Amino acid sequence: MFDSDTLHKYADVLLWGLSTARKEKFKKGDVIFLQYDPAALALAEVLYAKILDRGMYPLQRMGLTSTMEHSFYGKATGRQLAWLPPGDRELYERVNGRIFLRAPASLTHLKDIDPLRINKVLVSRKPLRDILDKREEKGVYSWTLCTYPTAGLAQQAKMSVKAYGEQIIKACFLDEKDPVGKWKAIHARAVRIKEWLGTLKVQSLHIASKNTDLVLTPGQRRKWAGISGHNIPSFEVFLSPDWRGTEGTYYANLPSFRSGNYIEGVRLVFKKGRVVEADAKKGGEFLKKQILMDKGACRVGEFSLTDRRFSLIDRFMADTLFDENFGGSNGNCHLALGASYSDTFSGNPARLTTEMKQKLGFNDSALHWDLVSTEPRTVTARLTNGKELVIYEKGVFCLP
């Protein structure tokens, strides 16, 4: 799909993202876990060589085909669904970086599978994710991911594979002479926005649009994060609020593909931090089962805003990685149900214990589902001194 020059640029951007996302510098001898879907093999081969050139140890693993994935979720017994392969725990306790190349052949191949079976797998693998979270908090591990164009993605986005690939090239600045330099410049601009937001003593945030009227409580000991290298592309600035202070209605007007299912027009009503009503124009039953995944699945784990001046993404891509970074004329916001991010803790994340997370209102769940709205919106901060300040309007942050 991509020519050699584009593949090398994409790989360089991913390695920049992986390095930027990690607190400590990578060194020779570090282990890099390279996971990829079959269609992304060409990019994986380029990355494999570049990891070797840096004196690190690449460990590659190709993902399941759509047919294999359907067989697994459709045929596996309960024990097989919850089974953790030998060596995975040891790998996760040793790995220093992870790059995931997403290239799904199909987005709806699991539509006939009971979502509770998929939930069981996610819950069973959460202890492994917790290991990686702890290693990241200590600064010895980081991750990044990207999307490689496929016919399945292009079909759902209603464009040709070539056009889909061109959208990825544009969004990731792979048509630039120095795409890494472009990403460094955007990263610097994002730092200024996060520093400004960090000076505000915010008691609550009010998000208002045509179909959304929601109040969030940032909570104590929080900071804004984002554009950190974790996702390529990524233009979002986000925080993990105190889930207990969520009140009101949120509406996601962009569709979502999740676990082989299509969901459209999600509407959530929160009271005292929990979803009390959930419906969707399409995929409503799947939505309800996701919220029942575990105790934290009905709570907010993340709130994010994208400044339209950063992002060149201006159309639906049928891929949350791109859709949650939609620029267009209004930017976007997204709300994630489920797990929170410890890198929005203002202190040292390595010292953020389970008890502290609970006390501060950081949510914990096997679920993390980003639900995107591109409606024109205004985000108003109510400050601790009683004053109100518009921090986001017309798709941009309102820096003074």
Image (cartoon, grey):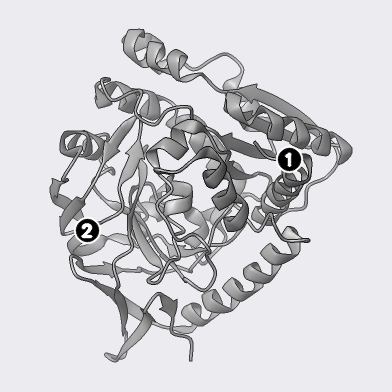
Name which of mark 2 and mark 1 comes first in the sequence.
1
- Residue 112: image location, x then y, percent: 25, 20
- Tag 1: amino acid: Asp
Lateral position of residue 50 relative to residue 217, left or right: right
Q: Which mark is residue 362?
A: none
- Tell me how far mark 2 sits from mark 1, CA to CA: 40 Å
Relative vertical location of residue 379 with respect to residue 305 in this rendering, above or below: below
- The reply, left or right, for residue 189 in relation to residue 209 is right
- Of 285 and 367, the residue lying toward us: 285
The residue pinned by badge 1 equals 3
Q: What residue lies at 47% left-to-right and 71% top-to-bottom?
A: 307
Q: For numbered disc 1, what is the local secondary structure?
A: loop
Residue shown at 61% from the left, 45% from the top: 144
Q: Amino acid at mark 2?
A: Tyr
Where does the image place residue 114, in percent across and percent down from the top left? Answer: 24, 21
Residue 343 screen position, x and y as percent:
52, 57
Relative to 15, residue 250 above or below: below
Q: Residues within 10 Å of mark 1 (few under 14, many from 20)?
A: few
Mark 2, other Cα within 10 Å: few <14 / some 14–19 / many ≥20: many
Q: Which residue is mark 2?
A: 251
Residue plotted at (48% across, 92% down): 400
Q: Is residue 104 left or right of residue 204?
A: right
Relative to 158, does residue 204 appear above or below in the rendering? below
Q: Give the image quarter of residue 394.
A: bottom left
- Residue 134 in view, yes or no: no
Query: 263 and 275: which one is in front?
Result: 263
Residue name at image x 22 percent, y 39 percent: 287
Q: Secondary structure at mark 2?
A: strand
Residue 146 seen in the current view: yes
Q: Is residue 31 above or below residue 305?
A: above
